[in-house]
Amino acid sequence: MSNSPNNPDDFDPYADIPDGVDLTQEEKLKEELAAAHKLKMAELASAREDDSIDSEAQDNFVESKQPSELLMCMVLASAYLGLAKYCWTPLYKTEAKLFYTIEGFFLSIAVLAILIGLRPFLTPSSLQLSFHGIKYRGAYWPQRKSVNWNQVAKVYLSPELIIVLYHPVLGKKRLWPLIIPSVYLADRERIAQVFIRYSPIKAVMLSSPAPVSRVVMLLLSLGGIVWLLEMLITQ
Protein backbone atom coordinates (compact mmCIF):
# COMPACT_ATOMS: atom_id res chain seq x y z
CA MET A 1 0.00 0.00 0.00
CA SER A 2 1.43 3.37 -1.01
CA ASN A 3 1.93 6.04 1.57
CA SER A 4 0.03 9.29 1.14
CA PRO A 5 2.21 12.38 1.23
CA ASN A 6 2.10 14.17 4.56
CA ASN A 7 2.52 17.56 2.93
CA PRO A 8 -0.28 18.55 0.49
CA ASP A 9 2.24 20.55 -1.50
CA ASP A 10 4.05 17.34 -2.40
CA PHE A 11 0.98 16.04 -4.35
CA ASP A 12 1.69 15.74 -8.10
CA PRO A 13 -1.51 16.19 -10.24
CA TYR A 14 0.24 14.69 -13.27
CA ALA A 15 1.51 11.56 -11.50
CA ASP A 16 -1.12 9.25 -13.10
CA ILE A 17 -0.56 10.57 -16.64
CA PRO A 18 1.73 8.30 -18.69
CA ASP A 19 4.89 9.67 -20.19
CA GLY A 20 4.63 11.04 -23.74
CA VAL A 21 1.04 12.32 -23.46
CA ASP A 22 0.46 15.74 -25.00
CA LEU A 23 -0.82 17.84 -22.10
CA THR A 24 -1.88 20.60 -24.52
CA GLN A 25 -4.46 18.32 -26.13
CA GLU A 26 -5.73 17.29 -22.69
CA GLU A 27 -6.25 20.89 -21.64
CA LYS A 28 -7.98 21.67 -24.94
CA LEU A 29 -10.32 18.69 -24.50
CA LYS A 30 -11.20 19.82 -20.96
CA GLU A 31 -12.01 23.31 -22.23
CA GLU A 32 -14.25 21.91 -24.98
CA LEU A 33 -16.09 19.69 -22.48
CA ALA A 34 -16.57 22.62 -20.11
CA ALA A 35 -17.92 24.79 -22.95
CA ALA A 36 -20.30 22.02 -24.06
CA HIS A 37 -21.49 21.61 -20.48
CA LYS A 38 -22.21 25.33 -20.13
CA LEU A 39 -24.14 25.31 -23.42
CA LYS A 40 -26.21 22.33 -22.29
CA MET A 41 -27.02 23.97 -18.97
CA ALA A 42 -28.12 27.14 -20.79
CA GLU A 43 -30.43 25.08 -23.03
CA LEU A 44 -31.95 23.33 -20.01
CA ALA A 45 -32.55 26.67 -18.28
CA SER A 46 -34.22 28.01 -21.42
CA ALA A 47 -36.40 24.89 -21.65
CA ARG A 48 -37.51 25.38 -18.04
CA GLU A 49 -38.50 28.95 -18.77
CA ASP A 50 -40.49 27.81 -21.80
CA ASP A 51 -42.36 25.26 -19.68
CA SER A 52 -43.72 28.06 -17.49
CA ILE A 53 -46.47 30.42 -18.67
CA ASP A 54 -44.99 32.03 -21.76
CA SER A 55 -46.13 35.63 -22.04
CA GLU A 56 -45.13 35.68 -25.71
CA ALA A 57 -47.34 32.73 -26.72
CA GLN A 58 -50.18 33.68 -29.06
CA ASP A 59 -52.74 32.22 -31.47
CA ASN A 60 -53.69 33.91 -34.72
CA PHE A 61 -56.89 33.51 -36.72
CA VAL A 62 -57.03 35.13 -40.16
CA GLU A 63 -59.92 35.26 -42.59
CA SER A 64 -59.50 32.81 -45.45
CA LYS A 65 -59.76 34.06 -49.01
CA GLN A 66 -62.35 32.14 -51.03
CA PRO A 67 -62.20 32.72 -54.81
CA SER A 68 -65.66 31.12 -55.11
CA GLU A 69 -67.19 33.92 -53.00
CA LEU A 70 -65.52 36.52 -55.19
CA LEU A 71 -66.90 34.76 -58.27
CA MET A 72 -70.46 34.76 -56.86
CA CYS A 73 -70.22 38.47 -56.04
CA MET A 74 -69.02 39.17 -59.57
CA VAL A 75 -71.96 37.19 -60.97
CA LEU A 76 -74.37 39.19 -58.80
CA ALA A 77 -72.77 42.47 -59.89
CA SER A 78 -73.00 41.41 -63.54
CA ALA A 79 -76.71 40.62 -63.11
CA TYR A 80 -77.48 44.08 -61.69
CA LEU A 81 -75.36 45.76 -64.35
CA GLY A 82 -77.33 43.81 -66.95
CA LEU A 83 -80.60 45.02 -65.40
CA ALA A 84 -79.31 48.58 -65.41
CA LYS A 85 -78.43 48.31 -69.11
CA TYR A 86 -81.73 46.63 -70.01
CA CYS A 87 -83.83 49.24 -68.19
CA TRP A 88 -81.75 52.20 -69.32
CA THR A 89 -83.67 53.07 -72.50
CA PRO A 90 -87.26 52.52 -71.20
CA LEU A 91 -86.53 54.50 -68.02
CA TYR A 92 -84.75 57.25 -69.90
CA LYS A 93 -87.94 57.91 -71.87
CA THR A 94 -89.97 58.25 -68.67
CA GLU A 95 -89.61 60.61 -65.73
CA ALA A 96 -86.01 61.68 -64.97
CA LYS A 97 -86.41 61.16 -61.20
CA LEU A 98 -87.56 57.57 -61.70
CA PHE A 99 -84.69 56.98 -64.11
CA TYR A 100 -82.03 58.17 -61.67
CA THR A 101 -83.63 56.29 -58.74
CA ILE A 102 -83.86 52.88 -60.44
CA GLU A 103 -80.54 53.10 -62.27
CA GLY A 104 -78.80 54.41 -59.18
CA PHE A 105 -80.13 51.48 -57.16
CA PHE A 106 -78.95 48.88 -59.68
CA LEU A 107 -75.50 50.47 -60.00
CA SER A 108 -75.14 50.82 -56.23
CA ILE A 109 -75.92 47.13 -55.66
CA ALA A 110 -73.44 46.14 -58.39
CA VAL A 111 -70.64 48.25 -56.89
CA LEU A 112 -71.46 46.98 -53.39
CA ALA A 113 -71.29 43.35 -54.55
CA ILE A 114 -67.86 43.96 -56.12
CA LEU A 115 -66.54 45.60 -52.95
CA ILE A 116 -67.84 42.76 -50.76
CA GLY A 117 -66.15 40.21 -53.00
CA LEU A 118 -62.83 42.05 -52.98
CA ARG A 119 -62.81 42.90 -49.26
CA PRO A 120 -61.22 39.62 -47.99
CA PHE A 121 -58.31 40.17 -50.39
CA LEU A 122 -57.85 43.85 -49.44
CA THR A 123 -58.56 43.98 -45.67
CA PRO A 124 -59.02 40.44 -44.26
CA SER A 125 -60.41 40.08 -40.76
CA SER A 126 -57.92 38.86 -38.13
CA LEU A 127 -57.92 37.91 -34.44
CA GLN A 128 -54.86 37.54 -32.20
CA LEU A 129 -55.09 36.09 -28.69
CA SER A 130 -52.28 36.00 -26.15
CA PHE A 131 -51.72 36.20 -22.40
CA HIS A 132 -51.50 39.99 -22.81
CA GLY A 133 -54.93 40.46 -24.38
CA ILE A 134 -56.90 40.63 -27.63
CA LYS A 135 -56.07 42.23 -30.96
CA TYR A 136 -58.88 42.27 -33.52
CA ARG A 137 -59.32 43.77 -36.96
CA GLY A 138 -62.89 43.62 -38.18
CA ALA A 139 -64.20 42.61 -41.56
CA TYR A 140 -65.73 46.01 -42.31
CA TRP A 141 -63.69 48.09 -39.86
CA PRO A 142 -60.05 47.54 -40.85
CA GLN A 143 -58.56 49.53 -37.96
CA ARG A 144 -57.06 47.11 -35.39
CA LYS A 145 -58.46 47.21 -31.86
CA SER A 146 -56.34 46.11 -28.86
CA VAL A 147 -57.81 45.20 -25.46
CA ASN A 148 -55.76 43.99 -22.48
CA TRP A 149 -57.15 41.29 -20.21
CA ASN A 150 -57.14 43.63 -17.20
CA GLN A 151 -59.68 45.77 -19.09
CA VAL A 152 -62.07 42.87 -19.80
CA ALA A 153 -65.16 42.51 -17.60
CA LYS A 154 -67.20 39.83 -19.43
CA VAL A 155 -66.70 37.44 -22.33
CA TYR A 156 -69.59 35.79 -24.21
CA LEU A 157 -68.67 32.96 -26.58
CA SER A 158 -70.73 31.32 -29.32
CA PRO A 159 -69.79 29.42 -32.51
CA GLU A 160 -70.62 32.44 -34.67
CA LEU A 161 -70.24 35.53 -32.50
CA ILE A 162 -68.00 36.67 -29.63
CA ILE A 163 -68.86 39.64 -27.44
CA VAL A 164 -66.23 41.14 -25.13
CA LEU A 165 -67.29 43.80 -22.61
CA TYR A 166 -64.30 45.88 -21.52
CA HIS A 167 -63.45 49.13 -19.76
CA PRO A 168 -62.00 51.66 -22.24
CA VAL A 169 -60.39 53.46 -19.28
CA LEU A 170 -59.17 51.48 -16.27
CA GLY A 171 -60.84 52.49 -13.05
CA LYS A 172 -64.00 53.72 -14.80
CA LYS A 173 -67.34 51.91 -14.69
CA ARG A 174 -68.18 52.56 -18.34
CA LEU A 175 -68.23 49.39 -20.45
CA TRP A 176 -67.75 49.15 -24.19
CA PRO A 177 -68.53 46.10 -26.39
CA LEU A 178 -66.01 44.49 -28.72
CA ILE A 179 -68.05 42.43 -31.20
CA ILE A 180 -66.11 39.71 -33.07
CA PRO A 181 -68.06 37.83 -35.79
CA SER A 182 -66.11 34.56 -35.82
CA VAL A 183 -67.91 33.40 -38.98
CA TYR A 184 -65.40 35.38 -41.02
CA LEU A 185 -62.35 33.71 -39.45
CA ALA A 186 -60.68 30.48 -40.49
CA ASP A 187 -60.49 27.57 -38.01
CA ARG A 188 -63.28 29.18 -36.01
CA GLU A 189 -64.04 25.90 -34.17
CA ARG A 190 -60.90 26.48 -32.06
CA ILE A 191 -61.59 30.10 -31.15
CA ALA A 192 -63.74 29.35 -28.07
CA GLN A 193 -61.18 26.86 -26.76
CA VAL A 194 -58.31 29.33 -27.25
CA PHE A 195 -60.32 32.11 -25.57
CA ILE A 196 -60.84 29.92 -22.51
CA ARG A 197 -57.13 29.10 -22.44
CA TYR A 198 -55.93 32.71 -22.43
CA SER A 199 -58.77 34.51 -20.64
CA PRO A 200 -58.19 35.04 -16.89
CA ILE A 201 -61.95 35.38 -16.34
CA LYS A 202 -64.61 32.73 -16.87
CA ALA A 203 -66.37 33.05 -20.23
CA VAL A 204 -70.13 32.65 -20.69
CA MET A 205 -70.98 30.05 -23.36
CA LEU A 206 -73.88 30.83 -25.70
CA SER A 207 -75.63 28.67 -28.29
CA SER A 208 -76.18 29.51 -31.96
CA PRO A 209 -79.56 30.91 -33.11
CA ALA A 210 -82.22 28.34 -33.89
CA PRO A 211 -83.11 27.69 -37.58
CA VAL A 212 -86.49 29.38 -37.09
CA SER A 213 -84.77 32.54 -35.85
CA ARG A 214 -82.47 32.52 -38.87
CA VAL A 215 -85.44 32.27 -41.26
CA VAL A 216 -87.24 35.11 -39.46
CA MET A 217 -84.16 37.33 -39.65
CA LEU A 218 -83.74 36.56 -43.36
CA LEU A 219 -87.39 37.40 -44.10
CA LEU A 220 -87.10 40.65 -42.15
CA SER A 221 -83.99 41.61 -44.13
CA LEU A 222 -85.70 40.86 -47.45
CA GLY A 223 -88.76 42.82 -46.33
CA GLY A 224 -86.56 45.80 -45.46
CA ILE A 225 -84.90 45.71 -48.89
CA VAL A 226 -88.27 45.52 -50.69
CA TRP A 227 -89.64 48.37 -48.57
CA LEU A 228 -86.60 50.52 -49.33
CA LEU A 229 -86.88 49.82 -53.07
CA GLU A 230 -90.59 50.68 -53.02
CA MET A 231 -89.87 53.95 -51.20
CA LEU A 232 -87.27 54.89 -53.80
CA ILE A 233 -89.65 54.17 -56.68
CA THR A 234 -92.67 55.97 -55.27
CA GLN A 235 -90.79 59.15 -54.34
Image: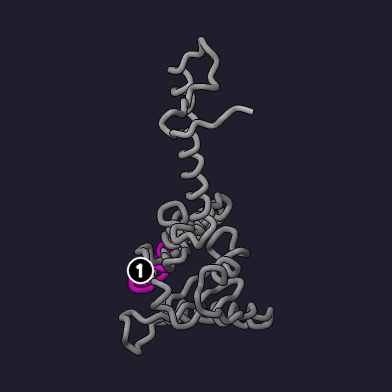
In percent of the image, x 36 and y 81: which residue is there? 167
Instruction: Name the residue tied to disc 1.
Output: 100
Q: For residue 107: magenta? A: yes
Q: For residue 138: magenta? A: no
Q: Quadrant of residue 3?
A: top right
Frontmost residue, 231 versus 197:
197
Frontmost residue, 36 versus 151:
36
Q: Position of residue 186 (x, y in %)?
A: 56, 58
Judged by its main secondary structure, the magenta piece is helix
The magenta span reads 95-108
In percent of the image, x 44 and y 33: which residue is there? 7
Q: Can you say which quadrant of the picture contains the N terminus?
A: top right
Q: Pick out the residue farthest to the bottom.
A: 173
Amino acid type, residue under disc 1 in the picture = Tyr
Is residue 89 at all visible to an observer of this figure? no
Q: Pick out the residue farthest to the top.
A: 20
Q: Quadrant of residue 188?
A: bottom right
At label 1, counting other C-alpha atoms closer than 10 Å, the crowd grade (few under 14, some 14-19, many 20 or more) is: some
In percent of the image, x 56 and y 66: which residue is there? 194
Q: Pick out the residue farthest to the right.
A: 211
Badge 1 element: helix
Q: Quadrant of residue 214?
A: bottom right
Q: Can you say which quadrant of the picture contains the C terminus?
A: bottom left
Determine whether, in the image, residue 177 is placed left or right of residue 210: left
Frontmost residue, 155 versus 94:
155
Q: How many marks?
A: 1
- Say above or below: 215 vs 85: below
